[in-house]
Image: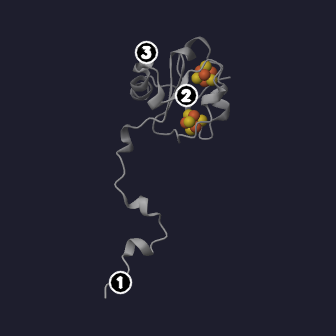
Amino acid sequence: MLGTPLILDSPVPWHNFLPRPNTAELMPYVITEACKSTKDKSCVDVCPVDCIYEGPDMLYIHPDECIDCGACEPECPVTAIFPEEDVPAAQKEYIQLNRAVFKSENPPGRPTR
Ligand code: SF4
Ligand code: SF4
C-alpha cells in the first residue's frame, strides 16, 4: 500500500507548491503624472516599508521594495497611485518609468520634508 503523498502531509498550503510567476518584472503600485503638481507626500507617511522615494519632479515607488499593501493609494489627494494593472491607458508609460528611474544615474532619494 502506498503511503500518503508527502505534499498532503505538509503544513504548507498546497497552492504553495504550484509554479510561481516570475515576480522580477512585477510592480505592484505605480505613481503617475498627477503627482507632479502635488508632491504632498501623504503616501510617504503611510508606507510601512518606506519604499516611496522623491525625484526632482515627482515621487516614485521602488518596484522591488513595494509589498503591495495598498495603504498609499487612498491617501493620494490627486489619485496618482494605481496598482499596476489599473494604471489608466494614457498613463501606462509610468509603469516603466517607475522602474527605470531607479536604474538611472540619478535615482530618487529619501523624501525630504
Ligand atoms: S500622495 Fe499622491 S500626490 Fe502626494 S506625493 Fe504621494 S503620489 Fe504624489
Ligand atoms: S502599496 Fe504599500 S508598500 Fe507599496 S508603496 Fe504603497 S504603501 Fe508602500
Q: Which amino acid does label 2 sit on?
A: Tyr
Return the residue found at the far top: 37
Contact? badges 3 and 1 (CB < 8 Å): no
What's the amino acid at mark 3? Ala
Does the numbered disc 1 mark a residue whose Cβ is under 8 Å from ligand 2?
no
Seen from this angle, which residue lies furthest left? 1
Q: Kindly identify which residue carries mark 3.
A: 90
**Which residue is denoted by mark 2 in the rendering?**
53
Q: Which of marks 2 and 3 is nearer the N terminus?
A: 2
Nearest the camera: 39 or 112? 39
- Most extreme residue toward the bottom, as rendered? 1
Q: Position of residue 37 (x, y in %)?
A: 59, 11
Q: Does the residue labelled 2 lie within 8 Å of ligand 2?
A: no
Name the quadrant containing residue 102.
top left
Identify the residue at image location x=41%, y=29%. Answer: 99
Q: Distance between the residues labelled 1 and 2?
A: 53 Å
Q: What residue type is labelled 1?
A: Gly
Residue at horizontal 50 percent and vertical 20 percent from the top: 32
**Alpha carbons under labels 2 and 3: distance apart:** 23 Å
Which residue is located at x 44 percent, y 21 percent? 94
Residue 51 seen in the figure: no
